Image: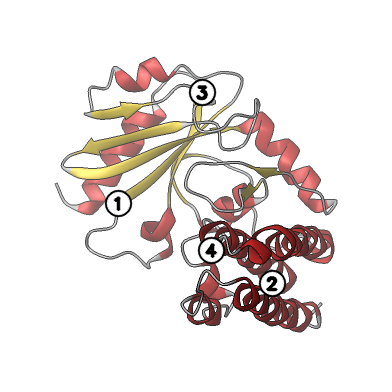
Amino acid sequence: MNDDAFLTYVGDRLGALPGVEAVTLGGSRAEGTNRPDSDWDFSIYYRGDFDPQCLRDLGWPGNVGELGSWSSTPNTVFNGGAWLTIDGRPSDVHYRDLDVIDRVIAEAHEGRFETEPLWFHLSGLPSYLVLAELAVKQVLTGELPDVAEYPPALREHAPDVWWRQAEAEFDYARRYHAVSGRLTQCVGLLARAATCTAHAVLAARGIWVTNEKQLFKHANLDEVDRILTTAPPEPTVLGNLVDRVQTFCAEAVHAARSTL
């Protein structure tokens, strides 16, 4: 089937599952930045409860996780999903609890958010990512809250939260890993700190983030890649490396804050 027929097929099947109030297409396919080999990112929005077994019963091959299987924190935004092959297309299905989303939206408009640990993400993901998803979504079935503007209170407060975490990562890398020549651990913390910096920059600019894949590009932090390629397991050089990355990141955050 062609892409339009595929979206109709998936939207109708997912939208008919018990408890599901809406289905969206997200990710690069919704944003128009996809490559031919990009997967398909779907989200099902439910209220009250959702039983993943009903998704398994559709018979699509792949792995269907339980609620909460993607995070160690209960009642989270990123509370599980499935990796499937649908009509030969690699497809992700994310679970989204509308009661949680209502709370997160209210908190974001007050400038508050939580950072949740999630597989494959260096610094975790901010709960306000669901607002970004809603802002770029393509609704296939049902209705969802209309989110377009980046909350002003979030632009004001989120950069400080992210930068505090980045500074702590830099400090720990410098004091405990660089001085001992522990290359992997030092560079790992620098990667986390730079990722937090990117979140700070984009929050200050009011730019939505849906994942970490393009963070450095959108925050103009690609220079960090070049700096880290010079890292050897020597304490003095590693210490200087931490200073260089922190200075570069601090300048980026300062420039982004000036746009507020």
When asked about the image quadrant of residue 164, the answer is: bottom right
- The disc, 1 or 2, on the residue closer to the chain's N-terminal end is 1
x and y percent of residue 253 in the render? 74, 76
- Foreground tag (4 vs 2): 4
When asked about the image quadrant of residue 255, the answer is: bottom right
Q: CA distance from mark 3 to mark 4?
A: 37 Å
Residue at label 4? 183
Residue at label 1? 39
Q: Secondary structure at mark 3?
A: loop
When asked about the image quadrant of residue 91, the answer is: top left
x and y percent of residue 62 in the render? 26, 30
Residue 218 visible somewhere in the drawing: yes
Does residue 253 appear left or right of residue 2 in this picture? right
Please tell me the numbered disc located at residue 67. 3
CB within 8 Å, label 1 to label 2:
no
- The disc, 4 or 1, on the residue closer to the chain's N-terminal end is 1
Residue located 37% across and 17% down the image? 54
Residue located 38% across and 66% down the image? 32
Q: CA distance from mark 4 to mark 2?
A: 27 Å
Pointer 3 local density, CA inside 10 Å: few below 14, some 14–19, many at least 20: many
- Foreground tag (3 vs 4): 4
- The disc, 3 or 2, on the residue closer to the chain's N-terminal end is 3
